[in-house]
Image: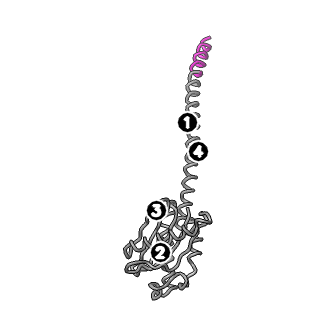
Amino acid sequence: MKLYSLSVLHKGATKSNLLKSAYDLSSFSFFQRSSVQEFMTFTSALIVERSAHGSRASVKEQEYLCHVYVRNDSLSAVVIADSEYPQRVAFTLLDKVLEEFSRQVDSIDWASGNPDTINYKALDIHLAKYQNPREADAMTKVQAELDETKIILHNTMESLLERGEKLDDLVQKSEHLGNQSKAFYKTARKQNSCCEVM
């Protein structure tokens, strides 16, 4: 699970305007990074332009998922992640970033701003923090703990079943022993009954 890009944009009437972005391109070779970054910037802008106001969407592009949230006030955010990254956590991140951005940056600057003029430093921090969705999102952390508990419980049930099967074998043996004991008792009784007459 990996996040590659986190961008904040303003959706204009005809095109979108990149306000701030952060990238983690460490998994790409050094010579590919600038091209990959340009492609991610282009893709983020295109997705925002083609999304309706007040909408959330996830768009699959090869092995990547682009999650977009366009608010009714035209402020938008896009996160590009691999296909394994949890969708709910991605949208939680987008919501958090847009809420924080709208509090720190005046809405007058959204339409004309650019990455150099916008003073918002938290994108890199959020991108790093949300690389591990289990640590960043409390709900995902609880779900992971529940999954681990379920695995332990399943293993415990398997061991109980194995133990149960062994108990069944013992019960079967004891039933068998019971039949032998009954046969022995009957035989002993017959032997003892003939001795009483004498």
The quarter of the image holding the N terminus is bottom right
Q: Secondary structure at mark 4?
A: helix
Residue 102 locus on image (x, y percent):
48, 83
Q: Disc 4 versus disc 2: distance between alpha carbons?
A: 49 Å
In the rendering, which numbered label is found on residue 61?
3
Distance (Cα) linking label 3 and label 4: 44 Å
Overall secondary structure of the magenta section: helix
Q: CA distance from mark 2 to mark 3?
A: 17 Å
> Mark 1 belongs to which amino acid?
Asp
**Residue numbers of the magenta segment:** 184-198
Front-most of residues 172 and 112: 112
Hey, what amino acid is under mark 3? Glu
Please state which of the two labelled residues, at mark 2 or mark 3, is closer to the viewer. Answer: 3
Q: Please identify, in this view, whether the residue under mark 4 or under mark 2 is nearer the observer.
A: 2
* 195 within the magenta span: yes
Residue 91 coordinates in the image, percent (x, y): 47, 70
Q: Earlier in the sequence, mark 1 or mark 3?
A: 3
**Residue indicated by mark 4:** 159
User: Identity of the amino acid at label 4?
Assistant: Ser
Q: How many marks?
A: 4
Q: Is residue 98 above or below residue 197?
A: below
Tell me if residue 137 can be seen: no
